Image (cartoon, rainbow, N blue to C red):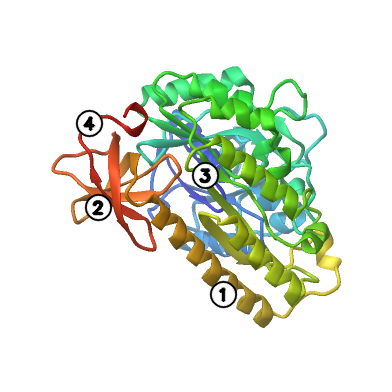
């Protein structure tokens, strides 16, 4: 039988889809692209925004119309957060949440054999363990994503994810090392540790912290680079930073979720830090890591945000000097506290603020790229472009393009950066030692 998978959302979702795909394959399914004819279609959903829910429902219905005799399985965050709404999508033959990933296959088989819908949704419970899962390979040939944490307890006023993902739970250190050893044997040189609230790794027991996961990952032979996914800024301590700074394989790229540079807005969002505390963390990172890239997410137009609040957020972003910023306009999320707040702004205001923030932060990105010019950086090359150029990333995740007369995919080479555009830098491969060896 043939199975196909489609993923909405974050790197955690992508990782979990990869694990599901591998499990189905190990049980006799042939995995095919989603646009091809299959016996089973699995749609792994995201529910961060109501727009995401809409796209999920549309894809479920389109898939069933296209392949009426196939089993369509809906899984992931949307059914977990809104079980009744998900169960009401009758085009989905199987509806499962963000728990018991392996159990999805049993539900699919039951739907095939008994010709009936299977809805298996159970709420998260306090103290539930981290669900064991391991990925052995990814579509990318040089970088792998490894989920080491699930769940969130921050309860930001705009966010539904704690409901969808449940309590904090963490992958044991030894399981991380085992998974990375397999990935290294399969040729992966770089690993990205990801989680729903990655900074909370180990928080549920207090027995270990994120720095220990980084140390464990860096200890694996064959893994040459370790980087982190998105981080909540208030949970990183000086000890964490000191320990990570001692790891030569650790990449100095920190995606610190900001959301707003205005304290009044941060308070309404129920974020757990002030702009001054965020700035102090950035200063501590830059003091410990040479040429660190600080990237972030900024939301504009949150409920109650005044023009003064918005301009304060813009000024703060410029003060920090981010390497890159993902800007998005606030949208009301059903089931959150922010849904019932006063002061929701017109779409036109949010869109105007989004355009202005993007314009101002694009200038920061350009300045950061300019700062990288005339330096020599180690680049892990990943892809060959149609024009014969090769593209890869530096340790601080600057995109670099360079020419080579041989296939250099999968190699880490020193590159002198000589020019840049809006996408990244162009460089010349330097013969000789890598920067750390020079």
Residue of label 4: 432
Disc 2 is placed on an element classified as loop
Task: Decide if residue 132 is in sight here.
Answer: no
Mark identifier at residue 355: 1
Q: Are marks 1 and 4 in contact (CB under 8 Å)?
A: no
Q: CA distance from mark 4 to mark 3?
A: 37 Å
Disc 3 is placed on an element classified as helix
Front tag of 3 and 1: 1
Q: CA distance from mark 2 to mark 1?
A: 31 Å
Q: Are marks 4 and 3 in contact (CB under 8 Å)?
A: no
Q: Are marks 3 and 2 in contact (CB under 8 Å)?
A: no
Q: Is residue 95 left or right of residue 38?
A: right
Q: Please identify the quarter of the rendering in which residue 98 is found.
A: top right
The residue at 47%/33% (across/down) is: 191
Mark identifier at residue 138: none
Q: Please identify the quarter of the rendering in which residue 176 is found.
A: top right
Residue of label 3: 14
Front tag of 4 and 3: 4
Residue 386, how many percent across, how many down? Answer: 21, 55
Q: Is residue 66 left or right of residue 111?
A: left
Residue of label 2: 385
Q: CA distance from mark 2 to mark 4?
A: 24 Å
- Sooner in the amino-acid sequence: mark 4 or mark 3: 3
Front tag of 2 and 1: 1
The residue at 67%/37% (across/down) is: 199
Q: Residues within 10 Å of mark 3 (few under 14, many from 20)?
A: some
Q: Quadrant of the N terminus?
A: top left
Q: CA distance from mark 3 to mark 2?
A: 24 Å
């Amino acid at each position: 039988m043939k199975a196909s998978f489609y993923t909405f959302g974050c790197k955690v979702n992508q990782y979990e889809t990869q694990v599901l795909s591998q499990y189905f394959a190990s049980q006799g399914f042939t995995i095919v692209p989603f646009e091809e004819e299959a016996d089973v279609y699995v749609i792994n959903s995201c529910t961060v925004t109501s727009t995401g829910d809409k796209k999920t429902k549309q894809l479920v219905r389109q898939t069933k119309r296209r392949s009426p005799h196939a089993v369509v399985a809906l899984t992931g965050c949307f059914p977990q957060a809104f079980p009744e709404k998900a169960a009401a999508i009758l085009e989905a033959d199987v509806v499962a949440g963000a728990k018991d990933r392996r159990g999805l296959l049993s539900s699919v088989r039951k739907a095939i054999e008994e010709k009936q819908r299977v809805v298996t949704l159970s709420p998260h419970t306090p103290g539930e363990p981290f669900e064991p899962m391991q990925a052995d390979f990814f579509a990318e040939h040089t970088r792998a994503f490894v989920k080491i944490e699930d769940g969130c307890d921050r309860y930001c006023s705009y966010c539904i994810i704690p409901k969808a993902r449940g309590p904090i739970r963490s992958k044991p250190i030894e399981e991380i090392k085992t998974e990375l050893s397999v990935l290294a044997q399969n040729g992966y040189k770089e690993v990205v540790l990801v989680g729903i609230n990655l900074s909370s790794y180990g928080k549920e027991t207090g027995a270990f912290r994120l720095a220990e996961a980084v140390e464990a990952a860096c200890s694996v032979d064959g893994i040459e680079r370790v980087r982190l996914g998105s981080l909540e800024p208030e949970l990183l301590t000086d000890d964490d930073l000191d320990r990570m700074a001692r790891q030569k394989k650790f990449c100095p790229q920190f995606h610190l979720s900001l959301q707003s540079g205005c304290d009044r807005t941060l308070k309404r969002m129920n974020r757990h830090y002030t702009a001054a505390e965020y700035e102090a963390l950035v200063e501590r990172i830059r003091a410990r890591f040479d040429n660190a890239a600080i990237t972030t997410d900024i939301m504009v137009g949150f409920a109650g945000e005044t023009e003064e609040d918005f301009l304060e957020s813009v000024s703060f972003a410029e003060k920090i000097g981010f390497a890159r910023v993902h800007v998005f306009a606030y949208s009301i999320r059903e089931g959150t506290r922010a849904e019932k707040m006063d002061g929701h702004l017109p779409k036109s205001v949010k869109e105007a603020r989004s355009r202005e923030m993007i314009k101002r932060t694009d200038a920061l990105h350009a300045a950061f790229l300019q700062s990288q010019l005339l330096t020599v950086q180690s680049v892990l090359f990943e892809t060959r472009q149609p024009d014969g150029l090769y593209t890869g990333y530096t340790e601080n995740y600057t995109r670099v393009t360079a020419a080579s007369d041989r296939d250099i995919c999968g190699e880490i080479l020193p590159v002198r950066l000589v020019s840049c555009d809006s996408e990244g830098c162009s460089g010349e491969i330097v013969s000789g030692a890598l920067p750390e060896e020079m």
